[in-house]
Amino acid sequence: LADFKSDLVAMLDARGFFVNEYGINDVLLHMAVALDRVAKDRVLPTVEEPETSETIRSLAADLGGLIERHFGTALDTTELRYLAILMRTRVIAPGAGRDTVEEFVSPADLAVVRGIVDRASAEYLVDLHDENFIVRLTLHVQNLVARAHENTFSRNPLTRSIKSSYPMIYELAVYIASRLQAAEGIEVNDDEIAYIAMHVGAYLEQQSRRRDAVTCAVVCPNYYDMHILLRDRLESVLGDELDITSIITSTDADWEAIDADLVLTTIDPLGRRENAVIVQPFLTETDVEHIRQAASRIRRQRHRARIKSELLEYFDESLFLRNFYARDPITMIRALGDRMIAAGAIDQEYVDQSLEREQMSSTAFTDSLAVPHAMTMSAKRTAIAIVVNDTAIDWGDARVNVIAFIAFSAAGRASFQTVFDQFVEVFSDRETVLGLIRRADTFTAFIDELVRIIDA
């Protein structure tokens, strides 16, 4: 079966398709069942061939040839057409060129996805306006809608990991899925939401690398244009991580006057060590690794400083509750919502939207933390109501000790992603959460412990 899978993937790749490795196992399972059924003389009834696209006919023919070569069994056209359609809707998507759009993408579906992406971009302050991304997402959505109408969803083994490791990206995917549900009259489950998150995450990762680039000054005395060779090599290898803002070719550089996050130098920095990395004129792999480590450290420090100031700004002692229990998530959201309404942070509509979001997909992002919230940033002001319980309560498929009802206002949009991701990251480690529960017996103790965890 492994050899067959390799040849199948190679065939699809040669035809210009992107292969979903997680969906292909579904097709292999159906194929194995079909082969077993044929071996026992139990074949699908022959039906008049419906109108089928050239793509499906071609896939069916290629698939039939592979099956016969690997297993010595000839499946009839009905079986092969079924497997080809299954493969087309669960496993493959073509590239995003003009021919792809004309042959595979429905203009109506493209318009729906473009509208949803526009709304998501505006709501979450992210730039998703990339034509290749929109085409790829539309291709995926067409397959998703086809599966939903058949009530046969694709299982995603990474759902739990995506939800806990990339909560903001998952949240964007939930928003997109909710709009798809409304537009197409379908249901989108957690596994399908995670597939949308994979599309969104892959695109945003490319954007964030450019946006989070560390500014860099290069000190390399001029000798046969060596500084130019070094700059070109740095841009080639580390262009997504570094933004080279200046090149200093003097041997007596004014080190204190250099204004950059990181200094890369081929000469001794004369005591300036906190953000300087000594490199060879001809960059080595060791140099590259040292630069990456230094850049990562600078990004982490910058990120933590920003998060610390933003996160702590939104807590309120009147919205801190210790050992506060409710019989289920809905009751807890309503109870915390009442307190936030009384504090002037939200209105009843925000509570109702948070309940709607909870019904889309559980907001238990880790085994310890639930973060109920609405999908729109319509709070009167940004605030976080926090519950810390000694005994875990049921929340979807998880049991959580900490519940953070987050309300974001339109003015807080720019902070949403960083606060949301950092909050989930803080509570992703079970031992860290247990330590916080033990020590956070008051609001002041909770804040002190949170700061300690962020700084750790």
Image (tube, helix red, strand yellow):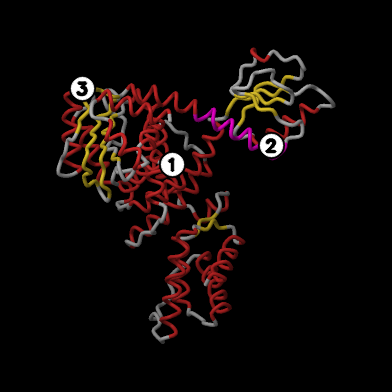
Q: What element carries label 3?
A: loop
Q: Quadrant of residue 11?
A: bottom right
The amino acid type of the residue labelled 1 equals: Arg
Q: Which is nearer the N-term, disc 2 or disc 1?
A: 1
Q: What element carries label 1?
A: helix
Q: What stretch is highlighted in magenta?
A: 284-300
Q: In this view, does 13 lie above or below 60?
A: above
Tag 2 residue: 236
Confirm whether the magenta stretch covers residue 296: yes
Residue indicated by mark 3: 344
Query: How far apart are the two marked residues, 3 and 2, measured between alpha carbons?
Result: 52 Å
Mark 2: amino acid: Ser
Tag 3: amino acid: Gly
Q: How crowded is mark 1: few (under 14 residues within 10 Å), some or many (20 or more)?
A: many
Task: Determine whether label 1 and label 3 are within 8 Å by CB.
Answer: no
Asked if the stretch drawn in magenta spans residue 143, the answer is no
Residue at mark 1: 114
Relative to 189, residue 204 above or below: above
Image quadrant in which the C terminus is located? top left
Task: Give the dominant element type of the magenta stretch: helix, strand or loop.
Answer: helix
